[in-house]
Every structure is written in structure tokens, then in C-alpha cells.
Image (tube, coloured by chain):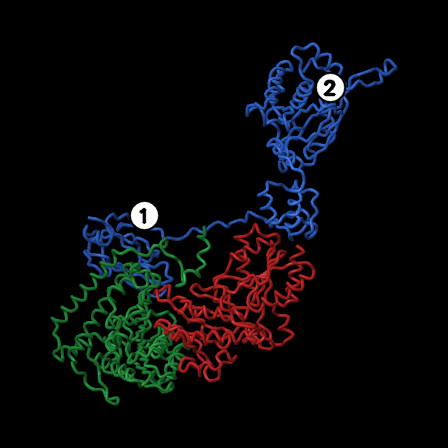
Amino acid sequence: MAHTLLEHGTVRELPQAREIHVKAYRLMLLARVLDDKFASLYRMGKIHGGVFLSRGQEALSVALGLALRRGDVFAPLIRDRAGRLAFGEPVLDAVRTFLGSAQGPMRARDGNVHYGAPREGLYAMISHLGAMIPVVNGALMAHRFKGIQGTVGATCIGDGGTSTGAFHEGLNQAAVEKLPLVLVVANNQYAYSTPNQRQFACASLADKAVGYGIAGHRIDGTDLTACLNAVGEAVARARAGLGPQLVEANLLRLCGHGEHDDAGYINPKLKTASVGRDCLKVAEKRLIEQGWADAATMAQWRSDAAHQVEEAVATVQREPGPDPYQEDWCALASKHLSEGQPETAT
Amino acid sequence: MSITYLDAIREAQARALAEDPRVFIYGQDIGEFGGAFKATKNLARQFPGRVLDSPISEDAMLGLAVGAAIEGMRPIIEMQFADFSTVAFNQIVNQAATLYWRTRVPCPITVRLPSGGTSGSGPFHSQSMEALYAHYPGLIVVTPATVEDAYSMLLEAVAIDDPVIFCEHKYLYYHLKADQLPTEAMPVGKARIARPGRDMTLVAYSAMVHEALAVAGELASEGVEIEVVDLRSIKPLDTDTVMASVARTGRLLCVGEAWPWGGVTSEIIARVASEGFDLLDAPPQRLNAKDTPVPYHPSLWAAHRPTARSIAVAARNLLRL
Amino acid sequence: MPSIPLIMPQLGESIAEATVVNLLVQVGDQVQTDQDIMEVETSKATMNVAAPCTGRVERWLVKLNESYPVGAVLGYLEASQEDAVRLGLDNPTPAKAPDDVDGQGEGSAKPQRETPSKIVEPTVRGLPVPANAAGASYMSPRMKARMIELGLHAADLAGLPGSGAAGRVTIQDFEKFVLNLEKSKLSQASTMRVAVADAMRRSWTRPLATVARPVCFDLLLRHRKTCEPKPGPALYALRALAVALSENSAPAGRLIGSKIVHPSSIDVGFAVEAEEGVLVPVLRNADRRPLKELVGPYNALVDLARQRRLPADATGGSIATVTNFGTFGLTWATPIPLPEQTLVLGMGAANRVPQWDEAKGQFVPVMEANVTLSFDHRVLDGGAAGRLLTRIAELLAQPEKL
């Protein structure tokens, strides 16, 4: 895949720009269609538990997923549907997790956005925000111990997550160890219902980078090209051994915190401002302006994506959920140290 | 040659580092300085790049351990004091303890917690936290009481594919000595009969084992033979050994340095009462620290935790029932 | 065309219900998959419910501004067989629904509200828990388990000194006792012996007392000579007891809690010595048959008892027992009533003794025997026992009327 080559921090126009924009757009479109499907499945009552969508964050997330490669470690967070797909995660993994299929990567033991395949370098998040940062650090330390070079560890977080102690400890640790960590902060203006003014007092989250002694980047998260450039550059810098990279992208969350939330608290002025633009539409416009695709082609792409999603959903809806009587109910890898479950002792 | 409990811990780490390239140690002040208690003295020099100083970030330390474990390493994390592990609590119980169950990827980390009270250490340098961690599924919790167990159980902890919370007792660091390191050992998960007896079963762990043995010695001169059980592992708990002992004696006294509510002593009694009710000739009893934070002043501290004196009183009461 | 139920979705983790605020389609409308068909309001937000497949709105089951729980059926969609199969709804069985509401407003939908549960009264008032596990009568779980294992009862441990608190027998005391037993001469007790021991132990849990009076047997013995076959002396006593009880059954009642349970029929048993123990065959309704009619059945039962061939219905269910300990030469005894009985009447050996005859002014020889009545002192006292015995003595003085 194509990514930026850097030269002392200057951003160059991407070679093979058409190819990468088309690839990115199609992944964003697939993520959006998949999200829409999850939303409607939720409103039909087919999903247990919460549904968290990525509407508005697709450009940022896909840019990160495309910049990473096999061997890297990626700990996505809540709104990284596009990034996961770009990293190579199958659509079925997301559908199986949401629909509680026993064949999903978490075997229905965890659900909604808490899914991953750690052995493939795709880590499954836990709910506590910031907690994945030191985990990615640890993975990079392991690579260092093993003499594996040229890998990058990336994780995403929101504006709210930057307030946690874990964020601070993790970023500081990465800086001290000079790890190739790329931390992408999706500043979507709200942490659930809490607006930025109640979340932090600094002018920009990217400024925190100075405090940790690392590089910081600030971009317009609604612009696919800006995302591809800056995120690609950050990943390349990290890979080149220049230490942790913090990327803050400004955008607006175009859905509720979860599908149980109607986001009525979002300031309507933001929705009509530039930060409130839908990155998918922005990308469409760019593709058309550059002559990289026309409306008919994009309609076909959308139809292909819908078909892919429908097939995945139809497949998973025929799969069984977990059977509690077949579960071993053991949380240890070392079976000989398990105490068993008292109430089932015979 | 005399080996202390602390020496044994250092020796075990040295051996682990030497024999398994996947092992590394991460903690505060453990590098050149050798650790607050010198548990890693000289190891940084002996194994360059594998004994690293971390910032004061218990959460990040444990998170790092989990990430390294996912990628195939076997980290040992030294918490400077068990009491500080509460800052790492989230990573231990929600990240490390759930990883295997959720993802099928094992989490072979070892977390060393310098635990228990010493005179003058106060509320935040004295805690015994084994019950908290034992409560969460997915964790192994061990409490070595002897020099030999400090050595062999730490080696086994590193070898176990699950997160092991290694509660080493600070009081025993320099007070306990042995002549040599063991060549063979009981496995994690098995309790030890520290002293056989017939009139009462006295179950203890960690430093309390030594108080229990003192009591047994004292009462032996009165013709009472007390059987002392050293649990060694809190989770898994060797219920079979405890049950067999109560079957021999009919009386049970559990002693723990931690607080009473929901502690290890309550777990043992719950198991014996529900699975071995007909073995009891008298109600099972327990003795714990007083239900307050651990006091600073030595005279308060001495009254706060069980000692041979208070255990003897409890034992005599139980024998009279 | 199958009916697909429209279900209230789970619109948030802690959400239990939602209020219907707007129906976006009407009955008869054609809808597409994912089309929004209803607006609902939860405590957190206003959301839309979507159609699960293409179809025609068949009917609504909801009322505007009413609240329905998650999982409730809100209405039905008429859909194609293909769609029903795809959704796994081949055999749609409507889930439990609130009361139907159709467009005409016939009837009313009751919102799903729990009826408030009645106040629950505790059934146990105060706990009968011993304050501490000490004291001579306390038996630890371990003791109990061992005793069950060895088939022992607390009564078997009588006289065993305890070294535990307040003299309780500890498991060590017990095991020492059992070990010492092994050293003594032991012989096997028969099942009969064990059964009798159990009955006596259970009987003895009550406060028992005995009263007695001497009875002159001359008239009875003279009457006996005139009968063929000869009734046993115990049978006279049995019949006298039965008649006396038919006049007043209270002394044979049983005390259960604070109630006296009166006997429903005067069935009286009599003790027959069998090998290793005692059997108690019963004469049913002994108050309704005269003595001469009881002789045959009595003798037959005695024989069967001695041979240990009593039928099952010949024992048990008696309200009192008669025992003739006089056959062993005993003049006095305090028999123990069966555990389910209040009374046992005993007859001692008759001896010729001098009795002062006021009329003749001299001692005259008479045949005299003690008749004893042992009883559960909770049910009757000495006075009532005495009156019963006096009545029996009266009846025995007129044997021809028995």
C-alpha cells in the first residue's frame, strides 16, 4: 500500500493518490453501511447490550488502519470500524460480536466494541479509557526485547479519554521509553454528553504532546486527504524511530454516544460548522472533483458494500449463540490450578 | 551459608532471567538501585536491558506487562509496596485477569507485592491484599511463608501461563533464613502441614504461619498438639488438605493478618462449614487484624494484628469449647 | 401470509420500557426493511423503531403515550413466507401481549404494571439458636455424624462424662468410649431388642408416673372357674379397662402441644412375651364385645404372638396396654407405656393375704393382687389415675358383667 515518505516533517502529496483515496473511500463506505446496519438491527431489537457507531470518524480511522501493516500492533477504540477494516479485520468479526454469535472472536464472552484478535496484532479493548495505551507500550517493549524492528503500535482515544490517569501514565511511559507509539486522539467535541469546555482547559489536546516531550500533530478530521497525509506521516515517523506521535483530529460525532442516546445535547451550531461536515461526503466530493470516480461508480460501490453487509448479517443470523452448558466456566489457562465451580461440584 | 527470604526472591529472579529470555523485570527503582528492598540487587548489571526502571505509574506498569505478555514475554512487575497496587487495580483485574477468558490469549505475568506490616510502616505500607485479588476470576494468588517457598513459588509463578499475584511478606525479608535453596518443591495449589497435630487445626499463611508455629510450640508443653497448616496458595485454595486436617482434629482456627470482612479466613471457614460440617466438633473460629487501617505506632500496630499471644488465647478458647 | 411480531427493542442498557409517542405508519401501509415505523421515548432519548422486513402493517397493539416494556409485542406485520423464514419466524407464535387495541378503541390496553405484592410476614418469630455451643446436652455436628454412623442415640451415652465446656461430651470423649466398648464382652442384640429399646427410649422422653391399689381377685377367680374356655386374668383387666375408658376416654387421650387428642375407638393391647422382647397384639373395640366373645380372639392372638406370626393389622393403633407381670411372680412394677400411648395397666401376682373383715371381727384370707396404672403425667394426674383404677376395681368385682 502507498503511504507518505517523509522528509523532515514536510507533507508531500501522496504518490498514487487516486489509488489510496479510492481504497480509503471504499473502506469508509463499507464502515458506514455496516454502522447503519447495526443501527437498524438495534432498533429492531436484534442486538443485546449497547451499540456504538463511528459516524463522522471514518476518515481518521481508515487513515490509521491503512498506514499500519502486518506485524504492527493496533488497539482500536470505540469508533474505529473503518480502521479495523483497513487493518484487515473481516466484516464477519464485527457482525458476529454484535449479534452474539458463539463463532465470533470473543465467543460472546464480550460484546459490542470489545472485540479483537490479539494474535493478529488487533487488541480487544476494555472499557476503561486510556488503559490500552500502556498495553500497546508493552507490546512494543516486547518487540524491542525480541529484536523485532520497524514495527509501530497504534491506539485511538477520544477527547474524554485524555483526562484519565491511564492516558497520562501511558503516554509518559511511551515517551520515557521512546517507543514507536502512535496515539490518535479523535476530538469529536463531546464525551457522551460532556462538551470539551468541561473536559479540558488547554487550548488544544495536541499541546499536551509538548508536556510529554513528544511530537504532536493537529488536523481536520473531516478531510480524508489531511488524515491520510498526517496520520501516514505520524506512523512513518514513529516507524523511523522518532518516538511517540500524538495526532489530534477535530471532527464531530455524527451519532449518539451509543444508539440508546439521541445526542440532543450537541450544539446545533457545530452541526452546521466546518467541524460538523460528514467526512464521507467530503471524500465523495474530492473523488468527484479529482475525477477519480463518478456518481454512478460510487452508487455501485455503495450497493456492493450493502450486499457484502447483508450477506454477513444473513450468515450470522443463522449461527447459534453460546451454550452455557457447554462452557467450561474457567478463567485460567492453567486448568490444573482451577478450583472449579462450587455449585456444580458433584 | 545463610539465605534470607529476600535472597531467595532475588535468586529466583536471577535464575528466571538466566533460563528464559522472555523474562524481564519492570518496576520502580529496581535497576541500578536494586529495588527499595534490594530484591533486584545487581540484576540490572547481570542482565543488561532486562531489569528496567519505570516511572511512578502503576497503571501503566501493569498495562505494559499485559501488552508484553500478549507479544510473548513473561514480565515480572515489582510493585514497590502492595498498598500501591490499587493504582494498578484496573489493569490487574480488568485487563490481565480477563484477557485469556475473553480472547484465548494467555497472560503469563507475575506481579510481586511486598505485603504485610512491619513496625512503624503505617496504613499505606502494610496491607495484605490477597483477598481482593483472589476474589477476581482469572488470577492466581500465592503467599509464600518460608525461604524455600519464596524461591520455588516465584520460579513457578513465572512459569505459570496466568497472572500470578506474588504476595511476599516484608517482615520475613530479613527475619527468615534458611541454609540452602530447595531443589524440589510442592507445587502452587498445595498447602503444607507445617506441624502435625491432633487436637486442633490452625490454618495460617505468610508471616502468620510463624506466629502459629510459636503457639503450637507453647501449647505442646501443656500436652496439646496443634496441627499448623500453611496454605501457601490463596487461589487456588487447597481445600482438601484443610478438610483432611479438620477430619483429624475436629477443631478449626484460621488466622490472617488481613482484615476480617471477606478475607481468606472467612473463605476457609465457609468451605469447611459447607463441605465438612460433620467434621467439626466445635464452631470454626477465626482471628484477623482489627477492622481499622493499619496503625503507625508500634504499640498500636502490635495490638492490631494477630500475634502468637492473641492466637494462643483464641486457641485455648477453642480447645475449651 | 405469516404475521411477524414487532418487538420493543432494548434501547439502552438500563432501559426497561419506552413510551409510544408517534405511529409513523398506519394499518394497511406497506413498509420496507429498516423503515422507521414508530417513535418511542425512553428516559434518555427519543428513538425510532424499525421494521424487520418488507410487509404490510397488519395491526397495532399499542396506544399513544402509553409505556410498554422491552420485548413487548407492539403490533404485527404481514410478510412473505420467504422473509419469515429468513428472520427465523417460520412458525410465528405471538408472544404475551398487552390487551389488544384496534383502531376502534374497543376495550383498553392495560399498561404492564406490577400489582404491588402483599406485605410478607415472617414465619419465624425469634430464633431458637442456642447461645453457645456448650453444655452437657450439646452434640457437635461431628458427634452427630459419628452417632448416626454407629447407630447410636443420645440415650446410649447416658453416664458418659464430658471433658468439654460445661461438661459436654467431645468427640475425643466419645471415641474413647467407643474404643473401650470394643474391649468389653459384646453380644449382638436382636432386632426386636433394638426396636423395643427405641420404643422405650422414645416413651421415656415424657414424665411418667405410676399409681397402684390392691384388688381382691376372689370373685374374679370364682367366675373364671365357671367359664369355658377360661379367660386369662389379664383379659378381665383388659375388658374392665375398656369399659372404664368407654365411660371416660380422657385418661387415654394424647397430649399434642396444647391439645388433647381423644381416642376414636377403644382398641386395647396386651403384652405377650416373645423371645428377646415383648409384642403387643390389639383387641379392637374391646368396649363393644363382652368378655366371653373376646376369649377366642385373645387366645388366638397370644398363640400367634408367641410364634411371631402376628398379622400386621393385629398390632399398633391401641390406646392403652395391659400387662400381666404377675406371671413372673412380681407383685409390683412400673411398666413404661408405649410411646404412642398414655396408659399401661399392670397386674401383679395374686397372693393369699389376711384381710380384716369388720363384720366377722377377724382376719379372713383373700386373694389379693396389685393393679398398677402407669401414665403420662402430662395428660393426667394422680387423682384421675386413681379414679380410673377405682372404677376398674369396681368392674373387676362384678366379673359376670364384663
- Where residue C230 sits in the image (x, y, percent)? 67, 13
Q: Which mark is residue C394?
A: 2
Report the chain holding disc 2.
C
Chain C tint in image = blue
Residue underneath mark 1: C107
Q: Amino acid at mark 1?
A: Gly
Q: Amino acid at mark 2?
A: Glu
Considering the image in quadrants, where does the C terminus of chain B appear?
Answer: bottom right
Q: Among the chains, which one is green?
A: A
CA–CA distance in space, label 2 to label 1: 82 Å
Residues C30 and A193: in front is: A193
Q: In terms of image quadrants, where is residue A34? A: bottom left
Chain B tint in image = red
- Where residue B34 sits in the image (x, y, percent)? 48, 82
Q: In terms of image quadrants, where is residue C280? A: top right
Q: Is residue C261 above or below residue A103?
A: above
